[in-house]
Amino acid sequence: MPELDAIIERFESVSLEGMDKVKLLERFDTKFTFRKDQLSGIFDEILPHYRMLEVSGTRFHRYETLYFDTGNLGLYSKHHSGKFTRHKVRYRKYLDSQLCFFEVKTKTNKGRTLKQRVRRADIREVIEGEAEALLRKETPFRASNFRPVLRVEFTRLTFVGKSAPERLTIDTNLSYRVGGKSLLLPSLVIAEVKRDRSSSESFFVEAMRRRRIWQGSMSKYCFGVANLYPLVKRNLFKERIRQINEIAA
């Protein structure tokens, strides 16, 4: 999309060091899902209010994530039922820099999202060493409870607000794999605004409201499991899955 690429180049850049000031490891998240062909107009509108992460001359950053769950997909089931406190357990690799982390994300009963991580050499299909220590510290589980269940790849654009402590991520080119099955979603965009409690202003959220793109999404993990594991419960996700599949068509 040449028009989209041209607009992306017009954003002021920010380095990783500049992003460190807006880590937001304790944050409140707002998600939106829409079509990729809407991005050019949205970016043109928010251009004065955000800087875009640039690393080694690139603004498109490729991610690979391997999610873990218990044998009965207990973490997924907790998300499906809306129970708190709930977790995501994963390895995440930044393919352009080759950096890799083991991460535990926790959603508290107060709606806060907490993320803790440790550096690892590469994605592994086992949880061991410092990764296992983090898992035991942040969750009631042991590594032996878990198995790898879903691999997700996507491309991310990351923005930081100029006037408020806010991060914005735009994820495109999503692909899912488990066993011999795969799911590709080239037309889908998942946007996520990350803010701390003190921040109320978001130019991106306002742009979504003006376009009547309403808040709401599923986690990448839950969407992938619901689509690629035919026997899991998905009743409470059915309507959202239908909406996302219509957007992605």
Image (tube, helix red, strand yellow):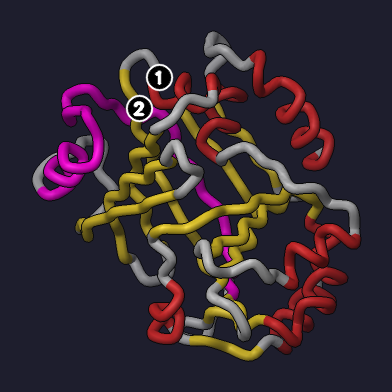
Q: Quadrant of the N terminus?
A: bottom right
Residue in the picture at 30% in, 59% down: 100
Residue under label 1: 73
- Residue 229 vertical placement versus 61 (above, below): above
| Residue toward you, 235 or 140 | 140
Q: Contact (CB < 8 A) between labels 2 and 1?
A: yes
Residue in the picture at 37% in, 45% down: 105
Q: Which residues are magenta?
A: 130-159
- Residue 133 vertical placement versus 199 (above, below): above
Residue in the picture at 22% in, 22% down: 145
**Mark pair 2, 1: CA separation:** 5 Å
Is residue 150 on the magenta stretch? yes
For label 1, the crowd category at 10 Å Cα-Cα, with few meaning under 14, some 14 to 19 and many 20 or more, is some
Rendered location of residue 42, percent (x, y): 82, 69
Residue 228 is drawn in which quadrant? top right
Q: Amino acid at mark 1?
A: Leu
Specify the label residue 69 is tagged with. 2
Is residue 214 on the magenta stretch? no
Rendered location of residue 225, percent (x, y): 53, 26
Q: Amino acid at mark 2?
A: Asp
| Residue toward you, 168 or 28 | 28
- Residue 37 vertical placement versus 231 (above, below): below
Rendered location of residue 72, percent (x, y): 37, 13
Residue 122 is drawn in which quadrant? bottom left
Determine whether the residue tagged by mark 1 lies in a helix, strand or loop.
loop
